[in-house]
Image (cartoon, rainbow, N blue to C red):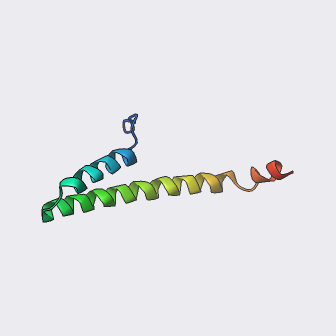
Amino acid sequence: MGKKTSAESEEARLKKKITAKRTGASTPEGKSATRSLVKRLKREQRRRRALALRKKHAAGSKAAAPASA
């Protein structure tokens, strides 16, 4: 059983949370919370980019050859 997929991506949700926290964060606790959200966002972005790269490598050069010929 996998995770639930929502209409809004995890990346978009994190970006919204970060912008909301940054507007009202003046305390050190707020800054650390924002920092952890930024770390989660970066992790999601790395995951997405790695997946795209894996798919690109899996396609190989066979997919590119017919397009140029």
Instruction: Measuring from the top left, give residue 16's x and y in whole percent.
Output: 31, 47
Q: Which residue lies furthest to the right in this view?
A: 69
Instruction: Choose top left, top right, bottom left or bottom right for residue 47.
Output: bottom left
Q: Which residue lies furthest to the front in this view?
A: 23
Instruction: Measuring from the top left, give residue 35's x and y in whole percent.
Output: 26, 62
Instruction: Choose top left, top right, bottom left or bottom right for residue 22.
Output: bottom left
Instruction: Give the number of callouts.
Output: 0
Side of 49 relative to 38 (left or right): right
Q: Residue furthest bottom?
A: 28
Instruction: Measuring from the top left, give residue 62's x and y in whole percent.
Output: 77, 52
Q: Name the foreground residue: 11 vs 43.
A: 11
Side of 13 relative to 55 (left or right): left
Q: Residue at 32%, 61% (x, y): give it.
A: 39
Q: In which quarter of the image is the N terminus?
A: top left
Q: Residue at 48%, 52% (x, y): give it.
A: 48
Instruction: Measuring from the top left, give residue 12's x and y in whole percent.
Output: 38, 45
Q: Name the foreground residue: 57 vs 21.
A: 21
Q: Residue at 81%, 53% (x, y): give it.
A: 65
Q: Residue at 39%, 58% (x, y): give it.
A: 43
Side of 66 relative to 53 (left or right): right
In the figure, 59 relative to 6: above or below?
below
